[in-house]
Image (tube, helix red, strand yellow):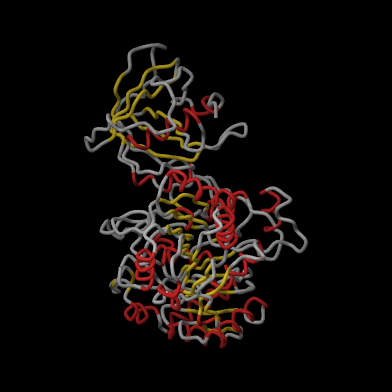
């Protein structure tokens, strides 16, 4: 089977990055979208292009070491590859392509020798602390080869403290060169939809402090591992989602996981527990039985948040509050793997057919039952906005699809206008308006005027006639709503204009490549304090914007691909009074 389009794009972006930058790139791919085959293809093509190159692939989970090795052999049968992992009984130090388990390899760099490219799978687990296995291994390899490049693969490109992996003075990676998220995978029919309606039971951890970026383990376990509470959680699980085929439980510690397993067994369901001290043979046996359907549930203390590939998981029960957005997203990702009907060729059909095949088979979706409050803490998994350390612990902007108005109860990001699950459309939010009359151009031509902006919002705008979508930007000036369409997914002038706007408002590079990325990163932007407008018939054209905080942006260079003229085109009719009429004239 060949690469899917996004897997090919990810490989190409790494090579393109090295074509102009001598840095360490990071690839962000959602769980279940084929990091192993992408990583394997990148490795194969590096060896083919540069036969003398030596590549190391390192991760901390032995199942990933073995899986990545076998994936490479599947696409490159005679690869000069070996394994360095005590858990697998292999110590192939001299292999040109060396798959390493961190715990075995970190202090054996002298025996490993020089590496040209080090690929790290689950790169979000590389600590910033220099006195750790990962950092010591990398530092020693750099002493052997100062020109060594590091490539990261992850589904969560942010640290435990929620900072991005490509930011900060202590960062290992310089740029995220490619992103393919959960939302894209679901839309393309390559991932199973996740549903997350609210639970009635909720754990209370109001008195639990934090240590090292997450909740203190002992205090957290004491707060949530209570028999009465555990029973309430299990009762709701079985009452509401008891028909599910495979359930994965995340618990706050080994004892909590063991207690929950015992209650599940008491309720008549088969269940096992896996934790950090579970023998590797027992772990393999349990996971094999779980995949085969011989076990209904598995409880764990977060050890199964990475490196676990059980496509049949259709219920995730989260009873372990975490301050780590990475851990939360990794947990949810355990349920996104797809089961297509037997004989279905997912690569021979389009996205709509794939989504229909998923919906009509045994795993139409996966339920994430959030007893821990992690969804409210971090937001929907496809719209994570990492908090800057020290910026507070406010909850993510969440709203509920209202069941009393015909909705489904799904938990959604506050910016969404339409529920992805049931299609319920939310009304336009009320805006506090000044006590002045609404205005419109009284004549068709006049000199530009400056308007004070009371508020600004961004919305997703679907493209017309097979054109890409855009960011609908609404400025409220008194009673007048003025709109501007910004196009990060377009090319040419439209893309350049969006990039200029982004830079002018303090946004950071790289520029957003999609509307969804723009919405996810909007917290980077300064407020718009004023806009300069000029009439264009009965519409207003927005000539320029003035960001807040009195920052000066006159010297901000235009994006490198900006070959546009310095004047606003006469056909830029992006601001309206009559929304319905405008929808007929938007060129995209």
Q: Quadrant of the N terminus?
A: bottom right
Question: Can residue 194 be seen in the rendering of this structure?
Answer: no
Q: Is residue 151 left or right of residue 530?
A: right
Q: Quadrant of residue 325?
A: bottom left
Residue at 48% across, 47% down? 416
Depth order, front residue of 544/6: 6
Depth order, front residue of 232/8: 8
Q: Is residue 97 left or right of residue 230?
A: right
Q: Quadrant of the C terminus?
A: top right
Depth order, front residue of 311/14: 14
Q: Is residue 223 left or right of residue 318?
A: left
Q: Is residue 72 above or below residue 11?
A: below
Residue at 68% across, 58% down? 358
Q: Is residue 262 above or below residue 563?
A: below
How far from the left and from the top, in percent, is residue 520?
Answer: 42, 48
How far from the left and from the top, in percent, is residue 540?
Answer: 41, 21
Count of picture labels:
0
């Amino acid at each position: 089977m060949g690469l899917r389009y996004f897997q090919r794009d990810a490989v190409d972006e790494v090579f393109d990055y090295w074509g102009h930058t001598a840095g360490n790139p990071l690839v962000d791919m959602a769980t279940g979208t084929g990091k192993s085959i992408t990583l394997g293809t990148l490795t194969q093509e590096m060896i083919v292009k540069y036969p003398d190159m030596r590549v190391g692939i390192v991760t901390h989970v032995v199942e990933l070491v073995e899986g990545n090795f076998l994936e490479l052999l599947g696409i490159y049968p005679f690869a000069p590859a070996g394994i360095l992992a005590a858990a697998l009984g292999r110590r192939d130090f001299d292999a040109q392509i060396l798959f390493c388990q961190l715990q075995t390899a970190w202090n054996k760099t002298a025996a490993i020798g020089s590496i040209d490219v080090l690929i790290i799978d689950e790169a979000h687990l590389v600590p910033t602390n220099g006195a750790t296995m990962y950092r010591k291994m990398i530092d020693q390899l750099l002493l052997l080869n100062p020109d060594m490049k590091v490539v990261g693969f992850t589904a969560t490109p942010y640290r435990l403290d929620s900072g991005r992996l490509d930011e900060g003075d202590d960062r290992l990676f310089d740029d995220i060169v490619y992103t393919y998220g959960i939302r894209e995978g679901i839309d393309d029919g390559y991932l199973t939809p996740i549903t997350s309606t609210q639970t009635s039971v909720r754990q209370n951890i109001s008195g639990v402090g934090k240590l090292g970026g997450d909740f203190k383990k002992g205090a957290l376990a004491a707060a949530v591992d209570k028999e009465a509470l555990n029973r309430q959680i299990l009762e709701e699980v079985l009452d509401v989602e008891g028909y599910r085929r495979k359930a994965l439980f995340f618990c706050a510690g080994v004892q909590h996981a063991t207690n929950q397993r015992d209650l599940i067994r008491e309720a008549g369901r088969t269940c096992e527990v896996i934790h950090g001290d579970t023998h590797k043979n027992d772990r393999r046996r349990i996971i094999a039985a779980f995949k085969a359907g011989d076990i209904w549930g598995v409880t764990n203390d977060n050890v199964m948040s990475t490196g676990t590939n059980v496509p049949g998981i259709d219920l995730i029960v989260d009873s372990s509050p975490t301050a780590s957005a990475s851990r939360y997203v990794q947990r949810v990702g355990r349920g996104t793997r797809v089961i297509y009907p037997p004989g279905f060729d997912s690569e021979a059909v389009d996205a709509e057919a794939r989504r229909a095949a998923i919906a009509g088979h045994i795993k139409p979706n996966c339920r994430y039952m959030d007893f821990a409050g992690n969804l409210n803490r971090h937001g929907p998994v496809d719209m994570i906005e990492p908090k800057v350390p020290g910026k507070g612990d406010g909850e993510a902007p969440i709203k509920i699809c209202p069941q009393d108005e015909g909705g489904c109860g799904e938990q959604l990001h506050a910016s969404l206008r339409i529920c992805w699950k049931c299609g319920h459309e939310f009304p336009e939010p009320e805006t506090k308006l000044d006590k002045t009359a609404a205005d419109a151009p009284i004549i068709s031509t006049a000199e530009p005027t400056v308007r004070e902006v009371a508020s600004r919002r961004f919305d997703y705008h679907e493209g017309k006639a097979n054109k890409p979508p855009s960011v609908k930007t609404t400025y409220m000036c008194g009673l007048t709503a003025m709109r501007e369409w910004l196009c990060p997914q377009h090319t040419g002038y439209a893309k350049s204009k969006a990039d200029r706007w982004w830079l002018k408002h303090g946004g950071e590079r790289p520029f957003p490549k999609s509307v969804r990325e723009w919405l996810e990163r909007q917290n980077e932007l300064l407020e718009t304090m004023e806009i300069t407008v000029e009439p264009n018939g009965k519409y207003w054209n927005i000539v320029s914007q003035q960001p807040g905080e009195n920052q000066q942006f006159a010297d901000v260079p235009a994006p490198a691909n900006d070959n546009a003229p310095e004047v606003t085109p006469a056909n830029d009719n992006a601001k309206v009074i009559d929304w319905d009429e405008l929808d007929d004239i938007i060129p995209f």
